[in-house]
Amino acid sequence: MTVEKEQRHIQSIEVGFRLIGVLEAARAKLPLKTIAERAGMPASKAHLYMVSFLRLGLVAQDPASMRYGLGPYAVQLGLAGLRQLDVVDLARGPMEELQQSVGLSVHLSIWGNMGPTIVAKSDGELDVPMIIKVGHVLPLLTSATGRVFLALLPAALLAPILHRVPTSSAAARAVIEEAKREMGRNGVTTSDSRVHEGFAAISAPIFDHSGALAASMTLIGQRSHVPLDGRGSAVEKLKAACDLVTRAMGREAAASDASLEDPSPRRTLARSTRA
């Protein structure tokens, strides 16, 4: 049996960032003694690290209380990290696990200039061939995926796409209200044989760090295998997968904790694509 050689590393950096981890987890500024205790090191040693972190801007110290908190450079690093997050990359692992767990096909969609656009997929075993292609634009009003965007996107973003749909504005408004009610009840939207005859789908939202709708993840399969009541194990696993990606995107609150019945106007897209 071979033992993988440990990569070389600088231990002092790892030790020092235990202090940063303490500050990141704290809800308020902390005195040096408390920070050192939580990091498991002597206060004298912690102080040396804190001096360096202060110089770099990773840490800031309140001149009145002498307590420490994260500094401006730490904020810049956090924002830079959020800018570099890619919902597609973050979703691939959870999508694969979800597909293997429930046995249905899974696809991920974001809002493109033509509407809900599939950007990643994990195919399940379907008794009847049905091709799900990356880059395919899904119907806004009739697909489970489209109904997630109808329920949660601001009207201003929906309007250009709805203008192209061959239906009356009254009919479109009725579908939007129905999608909002469904999302409010179960945190998911469904579609029964509206896109492909004999197949059904159920879709849930993924949010970014600000609470903006970033994508939707959708389960699709033969209608007898899809829980169209919006309940059951498969639905809970779908929502758990979306919640996992939401947290990876930097959102502390679970997607299901967000107010779905009255979507916030700031839920604009974190990313768009050309369809």
Image (spheres, grey):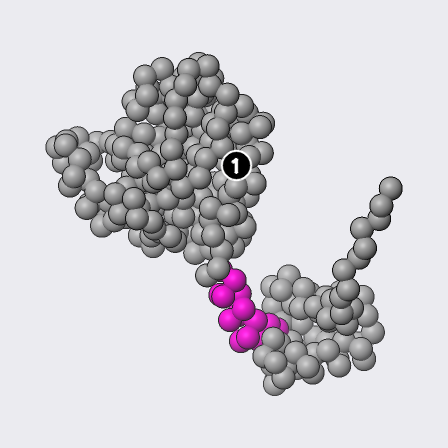
Asked which quadrant contains residue 177, the reply is top left
**Residue found 55% across the figure and 39% down from its top:** 94
Q: Is residue 55 magenta?
A: no
| Residue 259 appears in the picture as rendered | no
Furthest residue in direction right, as rendered: 1
**Residue found 58% across the figure and 79% down from its top:** 57
Furthest residue in direction front, as rendered: 2
Question: In the rendered image of this protein, does residue 210 appear above or below residue 1?
Answer: below
Q: Which residues are magenta?
A: 69-82
* Local crowd size for mark 1, using a 10 Å CA cut-off: few (<14), some (14–19), many (≥20): many
Q: Quadrant where the C terminus lies? A: top left
Q: Quadrant where the N terminus lies? A: top right
**Residue found 73% across the figure and 71% down from its top:** 13
Q: Which residue is mark 1?
A: 95
Q: Position of residue 271 (x, y in %)?
A: 37, 52
- For badge 1, the amino acid type reads Met
Q: How many marks?
A: 1
Question: In the rendered image of this protein, does residue 265 appear above or below residue 146?
Answer: below
Q: Nearer the viewer, residue 9 or 229?
A: 9
Question: In the rendered image of this protein, does residue 274 appear above or below residue 141?
Answer: below
Asked which quadrant contains residue 175, the reply is top left
